Amino acid sequence: MNLERLPNEEKLSLCRKYYLGGFAFLPFLWLVNVVWFFREAFLKPAYTEQLQIKAYVKRSALGLLLWVAVLTTWITIYQHFRAEWGEVGDYLSFTIPLGIP
Amino acid sequence: MNASDSDEDIYNERSALVRSESPALPSYIPDSDLTPPNGTPTKRLKVSFRSESLQCFVPTRPAALTPSEEEELTLKYGAKHVIMLFIPVTLCMVVVVATIKSVSFYTEKTDQQLIYTPFTENTSSVGRRLLNSVLNTIIMISVIVVMTIFLVVLYKYRCYKFIHGWLILSSLMLLFWFSFMYLGEVFKTYNLAMDYPTVGVIIWNFGAVGMICIHWKGPLQLQQAYLILISALMALVFIKYLPEWSAWVILGAISVYDLVAVLSPKGPLRMLVETAQERNEPIFPALIYSCECVHCSRSAPINNGSAACLMFVIVSSDQKRHKLRNKTLACFVFWTDGLCLTLLLLAIFKKALPALPISITFGLVFYFSTDFLVQPFMDNLAAHQFYI
């Protein structure tokens, strides 16, 4: 899909849908939104819808950062304390490494 | 404008995946010379029919050019598109080979087989094994033919919703279930601990964004990346569950079927295309790998039903397994030559061409001939310590 060929209203609509979609536990969608619409929002000469697109891109970026922080924290905690958690740790685990650390 | 029309076409009747159990469909390319009687520019048909194992080349050109311009541009296209198709297939192969070398799961032989290949190859005699592989091929090809005809019938009777639902279901399975399995195996290989919540988030994101990109709207490069990954995933499943000899025979048989179904007047896909032309609408887009030629003065994307490379990926990965680098390289080189030749023929004949046969024939011929010719030659050289 080439953004160049879309009229501005459709660009805005697309950006908005991607932004709203990201709330369904989809930080990746927010990432795609940011990367894809970055140029439209910040590097193109101004047009009417650009302000709103900018807002959506910024909010997506914010949401993305939040998710990254949460995930990093959780992964760190899990990897560090998994062995100590005993049964709960095993219950949470998708794969358990073999051998003695 | 013709150019933007065609692009809109690609994205309006979006691509959709055919489920892995659904058959490989023969490739078909419409006769791009058809013009409506009143002489208006040819409506470019985006005909790409997905198959897990077959390719379809769809050349699209705007109309109204002088013959010499046409010639020159079609030849230029040949070259450009070879390169553009080369990249995704190479990437696909790289992913599959990398996985096979590192994750042993996909090469561990198991007694489990696909239901399409019920005959085992674990037999003691060569004759029996050969018979079984031929029988497996017959079953697989019949399934393919039946499903193709079924799809054509569905299309003819305008059961679009059914087709759409089927395609969505198959892409769901690929994007979620197979990638979940793949991730699990990778973690096991590298002996990493991973928890369910994180895995859940990863798979959910991967799958959902994949569905959005493929079935709705998304950035072109992301869509292409997803198609490559999905082809790789499917190749891996086939490698694991398709017995070796059956794979070779199936490869040959599909190549023949491709030829027959495309060039014969009663072939199912020919009927499909004709129906679409009658209705003057693009055929139901399956997995289209759209190589948009962004630098071309006339933007004319070529659509390639991806995953035809699948077969070749399977083949080369099979070779990797046997650690015969010569064979892999030889096959890869000859596949490329086959691809170039096919595209050249496409430019010359400007009509429907099956995309696979040349490549597959080359590949098969050279795969087996390296066994008989190159390997003893190399052994001899090595024995005499003669380096070239």
Image (cartoon, coloured by chain):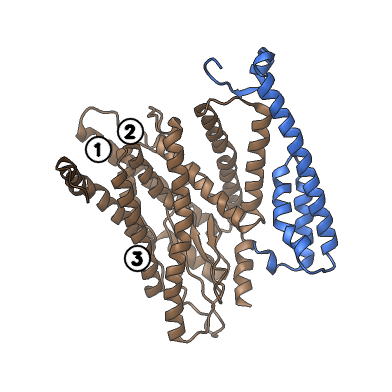
Amino acid tagged 1? Leu
Judged from the image, the secondary structure of the residue bearing numbered disc 1 is helix
Residue B121 in the image, given as x and y percentages of width and height: 30, 32
User: Looking at the figure, which quarter contains the N terminus of chain B?
Assistant: bottom right
In the displayed structure, would residue A34 be above or below residue B235?
below
Amino acid tagged 3? Leu
Q: Residue at x 15, y 43 (%)?
A: B380
In the displayed structure, would residue B88 be above or below residue B66?
above
The residue to which callout 2 is attached is B119
Chain for colour brown: B
Q: CA distance from mark 3 to mark 2?
A: 36 Å
Q: Is residue B235 visible?
A: no
The residue to which callout 3 is attached is B341
Q: Residue at x 64, y 17 (%)?
A: A90
Task: Give chain A's shade.
Answer: blue
Which of the two marks, 3 or 2, is nearer to us in this view?
3
User: Which numbered circle lies on residue B131?
Assistant: 1
Judged from the image, the secondary structure of the residue bearing numbered disc 3 is helix
Q: Residue at x 38, y 59 (%)?
A: B261
Q: Nearer the viewer, residue B219 or A100?
A: A100
B229 sits to left or right of B350: right
Q: CA distance from mark 1 to mark 2?
A: 9 Å
Chain ID of residue with mark 1:
B
